[in-house]
Image: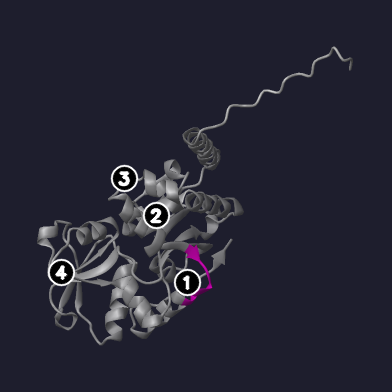
Amino acid sequence: MSDNDEMPKLRMAPRETVDAAIRRVEKEQRAIREQRARDLERGTDFRIGSVPYLNSVPLTRGIENETVFLPPSQLAEKLRQGELDAALVSITEVLFNDLYDVLDGVAIASLGEVMSVYLAHTVPLEEITEIHCDPASLTSVNLLKVILAEHGLAPEFKTLDGYRMEDYPEAVLLIGNPAIDFRRSEPSHQILDLGAAWYEMTGLPFVYAVWAIRREANTPALCSHLKEARDFGLDTLDFIISDRTEYDRDFRQDYLGWHIHFHLGSDEKRGIERFMELLEKHQVQKTHPLNFVT
């Protein structure tokens, strides 16, 4: 290079402002989320069902368009009849019906207070003669039966007729969004949270729901698809908490980030085993060993 040749002047990129950096990162994250959602939706013909409750949202992230949403009892019936390949069903559905494999590692569970499964009552527990139960409920009825039986109580269980809060009887078992709605209304009823009662009694987590897969439909592709949806949901849990419209953000943060969890590990399996022991001890119903698949 001769002395007359000039070195090209370096041009520095303008410094990015904090606001611009935040917008850029948000844009990049949004693009990644949208791509993962497209990948999950692409080319699948699985028949999947889930419940229409806030607590299931992280497990169906990206597969909402291919998922049928029904209350637990209706969902279990469709799965039982072979109209679905897999469904997020109450734990008792897989314990009472030897038809399914259970996806390992994924569940809706709590270690203590769950907030959305409870007995609301206006008289002391020992004075309750009958309990009206949410007709959507499967597991919670049996959970309440064994909790009360362990305390020597055996009230009559009846079906709740509708969700008019002002008409709720003196003892009512509620689950899911209706339970959250009633609890947030600051009722005069006392609340026996079944997750808290179970933990106090056993020291173990309680598993409310699992992915049940009909054995003839069980494939590695289906298992992978459901686990990818769970991973996507947990990876974007902050986005779900911010983006959903149920209730307020603080409640969603507390509920999805603290009261419930979405993994199925050794402690959760011990909780299931203990639940099976108590169901048989109190002659609620015969159970079947679970077959976990990955």
First along the sequence among labels 4 and 1: 4
Who's the residue at 39% across and 62% down the image?
Answer: 258
Q: Which mark is residue 268?
A: 1
Bin the neighbour count of mark 3 within 10 Å (Cα to Cα): few under 14, some 14-19, many 20 and up: few
Q: Please provide the residue range marked out in magenta.
A: 263-270
Element under disc 4: loop
Q: Amino acid at mark 3?
A: Thr
* Pick the front one: 277 or 165: 165
Q: Amino acid at mark 1?
A: Glu
Quadrant of the image occupied by residue 143: bottom left
Residue 291 position, x and y percent, is 54, 68
Give the number of the mark in front: 2 or 4.
4
Main SS, magenta residues: helix
Residue 215 position, x and y percent, is 53, 60
CA gap, disc 4 and disc 1: 30 Å
Mark 1 touching mark 2, by CB under 8 A? no
Bin the neighbour count of mark 1 within 10 Å (Cα to Cα): few under 14, some 14-19, many 20 and up: many
Q: Amino acid at mark 4?
A: His
The residue tagged 3 is 245
User: Which quarter of the figure is the N terminus placed in?
Assistant: top right
Quadrant of the image occupied by residue 9: top right
* Pick the front one: 236 or 54: 236
Element under disc 3: loop
The residue tagged 2 is 56
Residue 272 position, x and y percent, is 45, 74
* Pick the front one: 249 or 147: 249
First along the sequence among labels 3 and 1: 3
Element under disc 2: helix
Q: Which mark is residue 189?
A: 4
Q: How is the image coloured?
A: one colour
Give the number of the mark in front: 3 or 2.
3
CA gap, disc 3 and disc 1: 30 Å
